[in-house]
Image (cartoon, rainbow, N blue to C red):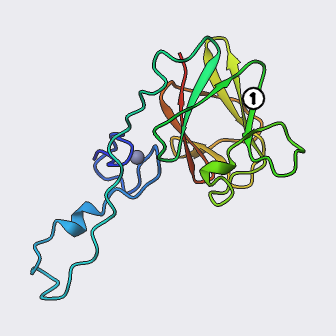
Amino acid sequence: MICRYCGKENVSTAVFCIRCQRLLAVRDLVSLPKTAIWGHAPLPPAPVEPPPPRRHVAHLGRMGNGNVGLYLGDKSDFLCIEVRDRCVLGRVVDGTTNAIDLSRYSALEKGVSRNHCALSWQGDVLTVEDLNSSNGTWYNSVRLAPFHPHTIQNGELLLLGKLDVWVYYR
Ligand SMILES: [Zn+2]
């Protein structure tokens, strides 16, 4: 079953998408004939139509060496950051962190910690390291163990708490 939100192919028995953790199975409910079970009662509301499959093209041709392009939430514009040694993603509340501030992407509401995770290079491969965040850094439905760098494939999705962060690099 293909996730309508992120496009990931999931096994047919999956209920939640392995990549973005969204519910997959609502289609069975809405495909019922109108009168089959519900009589004249109104059908339950259709699920909110997800955004179209990812169209992350804004970064193409616009990133230099060592740059990482992030698409946050449903935004189609990207945040270009330069990752040298280590780059922390989080929320800047009172200037006590030099993290990249994700506040304008509803980071607080979505459970992003002030120092949530760090990106760094391991050769040509990007890694993410959870910094013992409250709500976790998730990759393919796995909550990453704190302080253990994990490689990220180009074009994949991280969840910082509930904030979608699509990661692109070259
Ligand atoms: Zn998905």
Q: Residue at x 31, y 65 (%)?
A: 47
| In this view, 78 is above or below 162 | above
Q: Farthest residue toward the right?
A: 96
Secondary structure of the residue carrying tag 1 is strand
Q: Residue at x 61, y 17 (%)?
A: 125
In this image, 141 relative to 51: left or right?
right
| In this view, 59 is above or below 55 | above
Q: Residue at x 62, y 55 (%)?
A: 106
Question: What is the x, y in percent for residue 23?
Answer: 39, 58
In this image, 42 relative to 64: left or right?
left
Question: What is the x, y in percent for residue 92?
Answer: 79, 46
Amino acid carrying mark 1 in the image: Cys
Residue picked out by circle 1: 87
Question: What is the x, y in percent for residue 170?
Answer: 53, 15
In this image, 116 relative to 69: left or right?
right
Residue labelled 1 has its Cβ within 8 Å of some atom of ligand 1: no
| In this view, 151 is above or below 136 | above
Q: Nearer the viewer, residue 92 or 134?
A: 92
Q: Residue at x 13, y 88 (%)?
A: 40
Q: Nearer the viewer, residue 98 or 7?
A: 98
Label tally: 1
- Residue 128 is drawn in which quadrant? top right
Question: What is the x, y in percent for residue 49?
Answer: 31, 58
Question: Could you classify mark 1 by the number of other residues whose Cα lies within 10 Å: few (under 14), some (14-19), or many (20 or more)?
Answer: some
- Residue 121 is drawn in which quadrant? top right
Q: Farthest residue toward the bottom?
A: 40
